[in-house]
Amino acid sequence: MSPDTSRSRLIREAKTLMLAKGYSGTTVDEICRAAAVSKGSFYHFFHSKEQLGLTVLDEYFSSTLQPLMNGPFVEIDDPIQRALALIEYAETISADIWAEGCLLGSFAVDLAETSTKVRQQVSSRFLRLERELAQIFKAAGLGKAGDATATPEELAGHFIAAIEGSIVLARAHNDTKRIARTIRDFGRYIKLLIS
Amino acid sequence: MSPDTSRSRLIREAKTLMLAKGYSGTTVDEICRAAAVSKGSFYHFFHSKEQLGLTVLDEYFSSTLQPLMNGPFVEIDDPIQRALALIEYAETISADIWAEGCLLGSFAVDLAETSTKVRQQVSSRFLRLERELAQIFKAAGLGKAGDATATPEELAGHFIAAIEGSIVLARAHNDTKRIARTIRDFGRYIKLLIS
DNA sequence: TTGATCGGACCGACCGGTCGTCTTATCATA
DNA sequence: TATGATAAGACGACCGGTCGGTCCGATCAA
């Protein structure tokens, strides 16, 4: 599963450290030390710290965020029940997958005005999530009405924002449970829209 | 209003730079250069970078976030209309006050695991906002019912999370309007709870 | 033998922070 | 009104250490 090569160790330790202290707050020396790899080896595998960052971002998305969209809810046929199950699933696993923060959000805050390349990667990955969520919400019949109702895209944006924001608050208050609580409340909103 | 002393210039430029590049990504030399102040003077006014950070945090809260809670809505007598006006007010001014990000959220992400002092300051200021919001929601009769309804505190937490998260997404997508859009959608939720 | 992998000394620039010195405003005393 | 003591403010060279990144020789499997 995780091969434990020098390269994979560098990525893994970089992910942990950057989640804890941000991109700028994490040094290459520190990553090398944690991965028990020399600096020469580091620059054999990555030609810059930024390139490692992009690689870590990719790994984070496909190993942590993508699985979220492949939860058990995908097998539910009724689109309304599927949408509700998705939110419930997110609530259930939230404490596990976001206990240390979210790398997309962290990189967005840290690097949006510093590295265009990172910003674009973060943006496109958030958009991918948003599109998938909007599709599920739309299939559930959400956001079809006139003026006063949200579009599926707005609901998806609200959902992701609530999650990302609650991750920030969880860090600030040192209280992981906040994430699940906020997701649960977003679920109440969706239930109101359905009924 | 803003005195333009060396000290105030240091705080102002530090705020701008730290919003743009985060705490770790901003150096003391850089702040001194932007404020046209020598390094000796910097350490005459602040005995460390962290102390400047705490000062900037304080200034940011009282000059940017506290005014949000003193908007025109405070003069509305009907508690329901007041709650709705608060959300609308937040939506209106969101593009202005959060165009460059939110220092509370940024510091939470950057420093929560590095500096206990900063984390506590961020936490207590988020809590202050949350309590005030919860009070307004509670007065509007929100969250009094049984099991299936959110408490005023949960709604306030959801509101702040949605705002903080949308600020992160706005940075990621380089699109400030996202913040207002998310706040508007939270307003729809509150309207549903009222009716 | 060759190319991937690894090791770590080394680089110039920059980090947060110190220090001694100079200038300027304040103010009691003569 | 002139004087001298005091202190706040300003300055930038300087400190040891660390930054991201380079370089080249050693090691190892094919």
Image: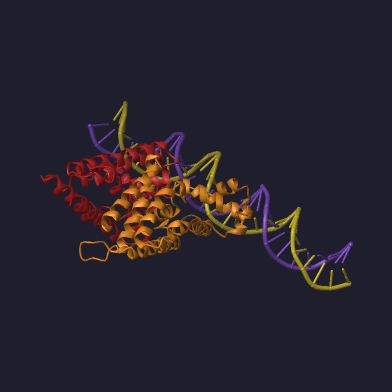
Chain colours: A red, B orange, C yellow, D purple
Confirm whether residue A41 shows in the render: no
Q: Nearer the viewer, residue A170 or A99?
A: A170
For the N terminus of chain A, the image quarter is top left
Residue A127 is situated, as x and y percent measured from the top left of the image, at 30, 39
Q: Is residue A133 left or right of residue C20?
A: left
Task: Tally the marks.
Answer: 0
Classify A52 as above or below A89: above
Residue at the front extreme of this rendering: B77
Residue drawn at x 53%, y 51% as measured from the top left: B14
Residue A56 is situated, as x and y percent measured from the top left of the image, at 32, 43
Query: Which of the 4 image quarters holds residue B42?
Result: bottom right
Query: Which of the 4 image quarters holds residue A96?
Result: bottom left
Q: Nearer the viewer, residue B114 or A135?
A: A135
Residue A2 is situated, as x and y percent measured from the top left of the image, at 23, 45
Classify B84 as above or below B175: below
Q: Is residue A37 left or right of residue C21?
A: left
Q: Nearer the viewer, residue B162 or A49?
A: B162
Residue A71 is situated, as x and y percent measured from the top left of the image, at 17, 47
Confirm whether residue A155 shows in the render: yes
